[in-house]
Image (cartoon, rainbow, N blue to C red):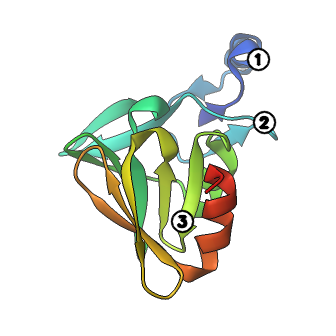
Amino acid sequence: MKIRLLVSDEHYDSIASELIKKGIDIDDSAELILSESNVTVSHLIGRRNGEIYRLETKEISHIESFAHDIAAYCGEDEYRLSETLKRLEEILDPKEFIRVSNSVIVSVSHIKSIRPALSQKFMLTMKNGAKVDVTRTYYYIFKEFLGI
């Protein structure tokens, strides 16, 4: 059996060693996930061109959902993730990442500019050049989060 661990760095080694003693493999590409509540992760596992990558969360500009496909953007590169947007919202640092629509989570440190749009919306330009809408549903949450 293979398990992916989503636990804090201080607990990772002790939990991993106990699982390994019991014959359970720790694998970042495993579908079965063991997670700690109220933990934020420092990396995610992404796939691109048949290869698996460890993505540092500080390098992710935004994460977007296209039906059942979830894509994380690091600079110009796009990686497929296996987590749902809801799960990502729970495990990413809430001081750094904010949901801005039903299909997008952004990293506030990767926002280059914010342009008000019609009907209580914002258009974000990310440092990698991507354009992201803050929808009406998330407009006031976003304003409060940034203090604007």
Callouts 1 and 2 close, C-beta under 8 Å: yes
Residue beneath disc 3: 100
Chain-order first, disc 2 or disc 3: 2
| Depth order, front residue of 59/81 | 59
In the picture, the disc for residue 36 is 2
Residue 88 at what x, y percent from top left?
59, 51
Chain-order first, disc 1 or disc 2: 1
Give amino acid for label 3. Val
Q: Residue furthest right?
A: 37
Label 1, label 2: how many angstroms apart (C-alpha)?
A: 9 Å
* Mark 2 surroundings: few (<14), some (14-19) or many (≥20) residues within 10 A: some
Q: Quadrant of the N terminus?
A: top right
- The quarter of the picture where residue 20 lies is top right
Residue 60 at what x, y percent from top left?
40, 40
Give amino acid for label 1. His
Q: Quadrant of the C terminus?
A: bottom right
In the picture, the disc for residue 48 is none
**In the image, is residue 57 above or below residue 125?**
above
